[in-house]
Image (tube, helix red, strand yellow):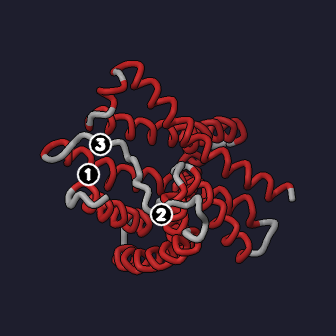
Amino acid sequence: MKVLLKALIYTVWAGAAVIVSQLAIGYLMVFIVGAETFRQPLPTAIYSALSYIFAIVLLVIIPKLLNDRQAHHKSTSKEKHKTTDDKTYLEKLGIKGWLTWADIGLAPLGMIAYLLLSAALMALFSAFPWFNAEEVQDVGFSTYVSGLDRMIAFFVIVVVAPIAEEVIFRGFLYGKLKDTLTNNYSKVFTIIISNLLVSLIFGIVHLQWNVGVNVFAMSVILCGLREFTGTIYSGIILHMLKNGIAFYLLYVLGVR
């Protein structure tokens, strides 16, 4: 029970770090540039990038530095320990080796599975009167229409967000939960609980019911890819595909 509680604390911590990062950077930028300027494409892009960086620093970099400092006092060979520990830490984040053809091929298959699961969950939740499946997600880029503004938005939505979110959720959090649960529960139970906790908090941090259900479904598949391949590469590609399609529908075709 204590181990499950510890896993839950890690999950809440990850979600809180993401939300706190968004609020802290957002309020700081509004204070500096003003609310109206903040909604312009370039400030919004800077906000998105900084909030992701801040969250990664809080969740990934600072704990790593603290662990290295503690381990350094126990290690008789500083350089040997550092090399081995850095490699292990990256592997725990799902960052190892290079992108493979298997990663690329699995991404569209995962996309199909995600769309089917999302459709099923959306149909299920649509039975509740408080659930609005048609509510539009506000991604911040409300004023740009074309040209450089569109390129900025594309880079943030389709490139930066998928990479950062996969490092945080399917990299750091999924790996952390598995490490926490592995020695106390069966492999199947560990994978299922880790997947559900990551997907649940991933849905919650999007702060919108219909978007939360949709990205919960995506996260279930992304965690599955993380488990199957051992890396986050295929998940990043799937995430980019999903965001790329959404970007095209929203900001090129104008479908709302």
- Say whether disc 1 or disc 3 marks the residue closer to the N-terminus: 3
Q: Position of residue 136 (x, y in %)?
A: 40, 54
Q: How many marks?
A: 3
Residue 63 to residue 229: above or below: above
Mark 1 Cα-neighbour bin, 10 Å: few <14, some 14–19, many ≥20: some
Q: Which amino acid does label 1 sit on?
A: Phe
Q: Position of residue 138 (x, y in %)?
A: 39, 47
Q: Quadrant of residue 243?
A: bottom left
Residue 109 to residue 133: above or below: below
Q: Position of residue 140 (x, y in %)?
A: 36, 42
Tell us which disc is closer to us: 1 or 2. 2
Q: Quadrant of residue 3?
A: bottom right
Instruction: Identify which residue is drawn at 52% across, 55% down.
Output: 90
Residue wearing tag 1: 154
Tell us which disc is closer to us: 3 or 2. 2
Mark 3 Cα-neighbour bin, 10 Å: few <14, some 14–19, many ≥20: few
- Say whether disc 3 or disc 2 marks the residue closer to the N-terminus: 2
Label 1 SS: helix
Label 3 SS: loop
Residue 2 to residue 220: above or below: above
Q: Which amino acid does label 2 sit on?
A: Ala
Residue wearing tag 3: 142
Asked whether the beta carbons under mark 1 and mark 2 sit within 8 Å of each other, the answer is no
Q: Which amino acid does label 3 sit on?
A: Ser
Label 2 SS: loop
**Which quarter shows the C terminus?**
bottom left
**Which quarter shows the N terminus?**
bottom right
Residue at mark 3 to residue at mark 2: CA–CA distance? 20 Å
Instruction: Identify which residue is drawn at 44% across, 66% down.
Output: 235
Residue wearing tag 2: 133
Residue at mark 1 to residue at mark 3: CA–CA distance? 13 Å
Residue 223 appears in the figure = no
